[in-house]
Image: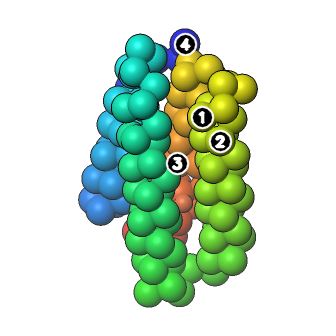
Amino acid sequence: MIKIQWDKKFELGHERIDFEHRIFLDLIKSVSQLASDKERALRLLREVEKYAEFHFISEENLMLDTGYPDYSSHKEEHQILLATLKEKSFEYRHDQLSLEELSDFLFQWFALHTTQVDSKLTQYISR
Ligand SMILES: [Fe+2]
């Protein structure tokens, strides 16, 4: 299993985004620790889904407010992520995916999107 923990590279220098990302990672970590309690893991996964939706809207509003030029593609990326998250949750719920596989997916998803997509947004905002 991949070690789920905060890393310096996730720090994007935008207080609000970093704060929300920390909570998001904390949720992922909590889910990953619930291997022996599927009912609870599923409940928490629901929280991850809702939090992701909230956080994406939060970022999208920030993009609109700052006139971010890559708004459309970043928003599309969010929609794809949410769809994939729902798919993976479904698979986990129906025993087609282990909690470990799900947790690895969530963490990789978080790490990749934060360092490759969100970092462009925070660079633009702080230019
Ligand atoms: Fe984003």
- Disc 4 residue lies near ligand 1 with CB under 8 A: no
**What residue is at 60 percent from the left and 34 percent from the top?**
93
Above/below status of 71 relative to 36: below
- Mark 2 or 3, which is nearer the eye? 2
Taking the image as drawn, is residue 55 in sight? yes
Secondary element at image label 1:
helix
- Mark 1 or 3, which is nearer the eye? 1
The picture places residue 112, in percent across and down from the top left corner, at 61, 41
**What residue is at 27 percent from the left and 59 percent from the top?**
15
The picture places residue 61, in percent across and down from the top left corner, at 45, 80
Residue placed under numbered mark 1 in the picture = 93
Q: CA distance from mark 2 to mark 3?
A: 24 Å
Residue placed under numbered mark 3 in the picture = 114
Q: What's under tag 2, amino acid-wise?
A: Phe
**What residue is at 33 percent from the left and 54 percent from the top?**
20
The picture places residue 110, in percent across and down from the top left corner, at 53, 42
Mark linked to residue 126? none
Query: N-terminal of the two: label 1 or label 3?
Result: 1
Tags 1 and 2 in contact by the CB under 8 Å rule?
A: yes
Residue placed under numbered mark 4 in the picture = 1
Image quadrant where residue 89 sits: top right
Quick check: 37 left or right of 111? Answer: left
- Disc 3 residue lies near ligand 1 with CB under 8 A: yes
Within 10 Å of disc 3 (Cα), the crowding (few <14, some 14-19, many 20+) is many
Taking the image as drawn, is residue 116 in sight? no
- Mark 4 or 2, which is nearer the eye? 2
Tags 2 and 3 in contact by the CB under 8 Å rule?
A: no
Q: How many marks?
A: 4
Image quadrant where residue 28 sits: top left
Residue placed under numbered mark 2 in the picture = 90
Pick the quarter of the image with the N terminus.
top right
